[in-house]
Amino acid sequence: MYRTRIFRALDPLNGMDQDSYRNQVITFEDTKPSAGAQETQIYPIEKAIPRNSVQKTKTRCSDVGSTQPCPGSGIPMRRTCETMINQAITSTARDTHRHLVRYQFSSEFAVRSECLYINPLLHPHWNENFGVLFSHKVKGENMARVWDKLKLEREEEALEWLAGVDWTSEDPTHLSKQWSRLPRRQKETLWPPITLWLLLNSPRAALAFLLATDILPSPPFSMVAKCFLYLDAFHYEELTRDERSKQYYHEALHTCLDPEKWPVLKAYERGIRLFLKRGTPEDVNEALSTIINRRIHIGFETATYLMDLFTKQRDIPRALSSLNLITDIRDYPQYLSDLRFQYRCCKLLTLDYVIEKNDERHFRILPEILKIGVPLNQPMLNIIYRNALKQNAPASVLYVLHEMGESGIPPDSYTYISLLDDAVSRRDLQHLDVIIREISSQETLRKNPFITSKMLHVFYSLDRVNPDEGWGDTDVFGRMLKIYNAAHDIQPLVDLGVVRVDEFALEEREKSTNSLPSSHSLVIMISAFLRIQSVRQINNMFDRFLYLRDQGHESFGPLAESDYIFNVFLQEFAQRRSGRLKNCVRVLDTMLQPLPPTAILRSQSNRQIKQVKPTVQTWTILLTAFVRNRHPNAVDKIRVMMQEQGLKFNEVTWNVAVAGFSTMQMVDETANAVNTMMKEGWAPDDYTFHSMQWIHERDRLISLMDNKASIGGRTQCGLADDEGSEGPVEIERHDESCESEGYDWPV
């Protein structure tokens, strides 16, 4: 009888919950589909409440008739109740091997004195009942039968109270008023069955009930937290299906799981982590402060979860405070060697920076990690070493090398990549040569794909690293080929025509046992080779690449799915005068054409290759080619074509346009380009201002600028610096005579 009345009372809410339960909920009797069922309806109990109002739940309880913390008295807490709480705290501290100082004891006393249960701090059958509820939900069993498996007291009385509540009341305090009228003893016995019934049958009503009963004396944190874990795990989407419902859910969670309710002893840490998961950055900051100030005992999982959150926010002081919480855990040294913890330390170390102290440079994070006794493993040492090289902290470099030697940890690929980066950044070709020889002498390093890719990139960039002492392009390619051949199968380069088989010794011509190259290694080898070829040879190689792509070559087919390889060919064509525009437009047109049916990857279950479309970088290189051939009208045309593809000019593209107009002394167009660039959110940089110096009528250019205050100052400053400049200088490859050419835009 009571169940029928409850379902009728909850009919508005159940109309929203029924979608989730379907056959797993008792059929609601005499219910009618609500009008506009496709839209989320907002009922009185779920009206959005501002946070400052929700947090005053305890204050509101005085308006509805407050209940005294201890049973049977309308006067301040009785001595017997104080004694019970003191004994309970002492017993719990003894059982958990914790020693509480005075302010910890006071905090624990304050939490327990406001709690519905005193000793024990939760209902005797709650954990068992909740375990049955949760496990059956996980298994997907019929939830209508779960009720009969629960150990419940005064079930009929609980259902009668539920049936007597007006769930459609417009008064947001109606539930709290109804609950506050009950004697404390009755609340103790009724809260668990009411909550469990609502969790089973109406999650929205359960959420409202949790918020309404958050008045003194309130249910214990652990019991409320488990309810929210259930709602969050199984009903989060339906409870937050629109912005209003989402706000209501998060406000209710924040209020009911507020850090002020966390006990010092045996805090339910899954509930704490749920609060952290759903909280704002300010909530997480508040949680950490509460844990530290009250010295709440938390475990390894919660401490590292806090550490993760603050590392992600790049909040180094709070991340270190979370790290130090681990030292309060009993037998904490056993956790310091845990791989999960050391991985978190690695993530934190990536944020490390140097501070000046006693005229020496030291790291901010590293000493804190060492202070608590974390053993350094190879990944951590590599990050420290890379930080030391990058931030010029020689003392730390020596420390890492010493630690590696003492621990018997040899340098790995990450270490050598750091060394290569350091040598390149310092333009130290002599040191670079030593590192490369050392890598080449060790087979495991020589065949490592990451080191190979890094070394190829270093050699490819040598002319930019040190143009005075670098080698020529041909010599660089020869060295790169040796590095590549030591690690990767040479066959893809043979198939493309980059190398010939007869260039290698007989034993090297046999089927290689080396791995296939990565896309990066393959493209950078092709790029290095194209630098030393003529336009005709580049065209032949582009044709060969397209043929291999269309045949589904296992190495070149996947390259067509990235703009990387097409940009390489486009860049080489753009740097040569002969056939520049015709060849560049051909590359773009190829990217816009569909692939033939034969373009499938047989090694990947005949997967169809997806031809990449031109990217912003592709269009930028194409614009560079037209600007070099003095075709200023191409700027607007390329911009329109990009917009049709859903793309916009970026900072680099605008700088190419400004440079093109400036070299052709097109003052109006230069000013218009800079103005449009700024309107689209791109601030002019040093490249922009340098290009503007090529304009002879600089005063007129400045007068046409929209933001004369900022532009004018920078331009005048640049004029003084560049006085006597002869104008732009282009570096191009002249392998054939320049010819007059026509071109067709891709369709």
Image (spheres, rainbow, N blue to C red):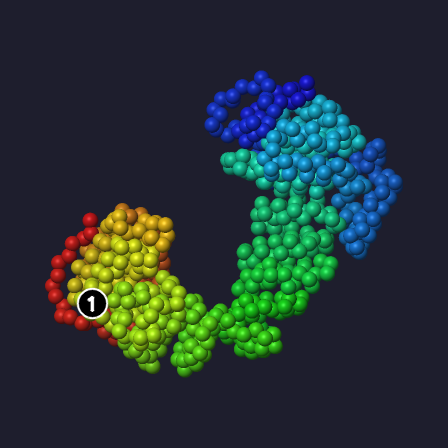
Q: Residue furthest left?
A: 740
Q: Position of residue 71 (x, y in %)?
A: 82, 34
Q: Amino acid at mark 1?
A: Gln
Q: Position of residue 244 (x, y in %)?
A: 53, 35
Q: Quadrant of the N terminus?
A: top right
With respect to residue 316, does 269 lie above or below? Answer: above
Please give the residue where the numbered disc 1 appears in the rendered image. Answer: 537
Badge 1 crowding class, 10 Å Cα cut-off, few under 14, some 14 to 19, many 20 or more, is few
Q: Residue at x 56, y 35 (%)?
A: 239
Q: Quadrant of residue 717?
A: bottom left
- Viewer-side residue, 462 vs 699: 462
Q: Residue at x 15, y 70 (%)?
A: 736
With respect to residue 409, does 646 lie above or below? Answer: above
**Could you tell me if residue 447 is visible in this image?**
yes
With respect to residue 116, does 565 lie above or below? Answer: below
Viewed as shown, does residue 251 lie left or right of 554? right
Viewed as shown, does residue 344 lie left or right of 325? left
- Viewer-side residue, 30 vs 277: 30
Q: Residue furthest right?
A: 79
